[in-house]
Amino acid sequence: MFQESEIINLISGFVSVLLIRLIFMKKEMPRFRFLYTAFFCIISGYLFTILEGIGWHVFFNLLEHCSYAAAGLLFFISARSMRASPATTQESEHA
Amino acid sequence: MHEIAVSFFDVVSAVGFTLAVAVALRIPSEVIAPVSRFLFVFALAIYAVVGVANVLEHAHITDYFDRYEDYLEILFPLTFTYFLYSVITHQELDRRKKAEMALNAALKKAEDAKARSDSVIEAIGDGICILNSDFRVLYQNRIHEDFMGQHSGEFCYNAFRNRDCKCENCSLTLSLNDGGVHMMERTAMKGDQIRDLEVTTSPLRDSAGRIIAGIEVVRDVTERKKFEDQLMQIRKMEAIGQLAGGIAHDFNNILTAVTGYGSILQNEVKDHEPLRHYVDLILEASKKLKKLTLGLLTFSRKQMIHPKSVALHNIIRNAVRLFPQPMGTAIDVKTELTDEALTVMADSDQIEEVLLGLAANAYEAMPDGGRLTLKTGRYEMDDAFIKQHGYGTHGSFAVITVTDSGIGMDEQTTENVFQPFFSTKETGEGTGLSLAIAYGIMKQHNGYITAESTPGKGTAFKIFLPLTDADA
């Protein structure tokens, strides 16, 4: 089955998703697209963790770890793109 | 197989998050604020640790960190959400700060532009006034305020012309109606002086080309008009001189024949014969006419002069000896000669004739007696003299001032005193040529003669002769 901490993680994750979707994503930060996608991967991982406890353990377990791996890569890409020159960053932020 | 895949994904996750942490630590402050960077790194570090812990567990090295995974994973959504919030807040602040800076820069630029245009307007030297379509004064520069006084907000016709309604043929009305530039003349009092002003009006348009106000540019043309009058006077004298000279030259030739034949007749007709009287009258009239034509020739500078280097004081002493002694009146003639020896290039006889002419005029101006003074000095002619009189050249001059304590002349008489045939005497009492002759003689000597007079107080004539370095 699943643990209490996993439920809590999922709930806090969904709340964060809502906040991000409703408020932060309206602020037009194109550079942060990778960031959001990486975060959603993490939240997906939480979901797969719960689903893993319900059924198809192997499949959802694989998906869970795959989500975390994808999140890691996406966070790395996002950090790299944020580290680009300030002028380039500012131009795209104001685009 | 499943274990291998999971291990692989865990390794990728661990490496990805670890690299992300390393890169995130170097994100510049211009992109995200240091606080936001800290939160981001912390959030990434959570899953870097989780990833490494999973790798160690799968590698059967240690599962020590497994117990902390849950706590760490709970922190992640909160930390990440707060990270995004801090980024957005800082961006908002940054944007506001930049907007404020841009606004301040724009305001400063506008203020600088205004200060520049104000400086340009003040430096122009003319008075500038802006009036709206209701003829109210919106702006005056300092020079306009000096001319017309401070009248911001008032109607121009009331402020400048003391009227209750618009002026007829107002150039501002024309400019506002047809969008053209118009000019008119106006006078204004500056202190106790009347100044002549030239007023030019033009429309002020907005960026769409609509006329929104009028601009009035006021220029003080008093000095220019004075200069034009002086120039006209000089040209008049030149023209009169040319005319008089031409006529006198022809007269002289004809007169030579009359005088010659008259002399022949005088020799032929004996003293006791009745016709002798008429011949004598003819010759006497010819002599007078000859003198008149010589005077005109001198005025027009067609008479030959013989200049040489002479001591000015000698000329004056000789001339004073020749001054007439008036009967029945006591005129005190005084000379005040400077200690400096003044040498001029001049025809002594001509200068003596000038002084004699001035003395004769002075005596006539003092029928009840008075004082006649001749004073000499050195004068350095400068721009002030040239500007005042409209003529002159820079250089060192000897000046003779002939002053009398006579009845004086009014301004109009003083202005015309050097014109030929100009006289204040009754008809037949004088030719009106002596001062014109003096003028002509001075012009031939490259000198100048001026007159200043006050009715009731006397007159002063100043004669300027260029000094020379040659020995007398």
Image (spheres, helix red, strand yellow):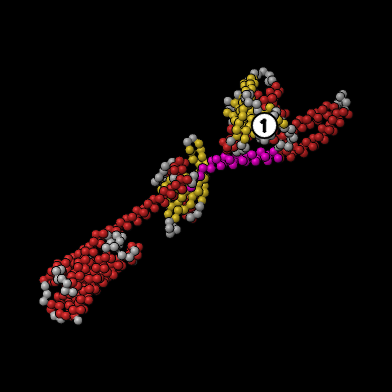
Q: Height in image: A17 above or below B135? A: below
B466 left or right of B123 in image: right
Front residue of this view, candidates A33 and B3: B3
Front residue of this view, candidates B302 and A44: A44
* Dot 1 crowding, Cα within 10 Å, few <14, some 14–19, many 20+: few
| Whole-percent x, y for residue B67 in the image | 13, 69
| Whole-percent x, y for residue B45 in the image | 21, 66
| Whole-percent x, y for residue B102 in the image | 35, 56
Q: Which residues are magenta?
A: B217-242
Which residue is under mark 1? B469
Front residue of this view, candidates A31 and B209: A31
Residue B418 appears in view: no
- Amino acid type of the residue that numbered disc 1 sits on in the rendered structure: Asp
Q: Residue at x 59, y 37 (%)?
A: B386
B283 left or right of B194 in image: right
| Whole-percent x, y for residue B320 in the image | 68, 23
